[in-house]
């Protein structure tokens, strides 16, 4: 199985400068620690740099999802999202979940996770 097939993109939001993605590793069938299976990553489009966001909590309501990280907060619905980071301007995002995730970034994620 190719490394990029060992990950599944659960959520995918982006704008001109960043991609935020929730990634599930599908190659760790016997792992019970969810923090080793599920990740939120921020990919900087210009540099290709990937940062793992430190998950704190989540909330799901009828129309809105919320994820809180040590680095900031993401709120999103089926169309748009807003990523608010400490000491930075909030970034508006488009929710592309369900769309084809860019193959180059999928490969970058596999390399970042060393799979």
Image (cartoon, rainbow, N blue to C red):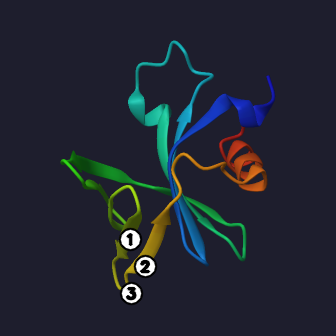
Left or right: 9 as drawn, with respect to 86: right
| Disc on res. 91 | 2
| Disc on res. 89 | 3
| Disc on res. 59 | none
Residue 53 spot, x, y in % from top left: 45, 57
* 3D distance between C-alphas at marks 2 and 3: 6 Å
Q: Quadrant of the C terminus?
A: top right
Dividing the picture into quarters, in which one does residue 81 lie? bottom left
Left or right: 82 as drawn, with respect to 2: left
Q: Residues within 10 Å of mark 1 (few under 14, many from 20)?
A: many
Left or right: 49 as drawn, with respect to 78: right
Residue 23 spot, x, y in % from top left: 53, 42
Residue at 38% over, 55% down: 78
* 3D distance between C-alphas at marks 3 and 1: 9 Å
Under circle 1, the secondary element is: strand
Disc 1: which residue: 83
Q: Decide: marks 1, 2 in contact (CB < 8 A)? A: yes
Is residue 115 visible in the rendered image? The answer is no
Asked if residue 83 is positioned above or below residue 29 in the image, the reply reads: below
Residue at 77% over, 47% down: 107
* 3D distance between C-alphas at marks 1 and 2: 5 Å
Q: Decide: marks 2, 3 in contact (CB < 8 A)? A: yes
Under circle 2, the secondary element is: strand
Residue 45 spot, x, y in % from top left: 68, 71
- Viewer-closest of 84 and 53: 84
């Amino acid at each position: 199985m190719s490394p990029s097939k060992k990950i599944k993109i659960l959520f995918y939001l982006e704008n001109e400068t960043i991609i935020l993605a929730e990634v599930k590793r599908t190659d760790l069938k016997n792992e019970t620690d969810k923090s080793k299976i599920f990740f939120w990553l921020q990919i900087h489009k210009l540099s290709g740099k990937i940062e793992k966001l430190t998950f704190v909590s989540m909330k799901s309501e009828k129309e809105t999802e919320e994820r809180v990280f040590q680095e900031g907060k993401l709120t999103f619905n089926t169309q748009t999202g807003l990523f608010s980071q400490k000491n930075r301007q909030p970034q508006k995002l488009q929710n592309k979940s369900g769309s084809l995730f860019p193959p180059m970034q999928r490969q970058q994620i596999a390399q970042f996770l060393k799979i």
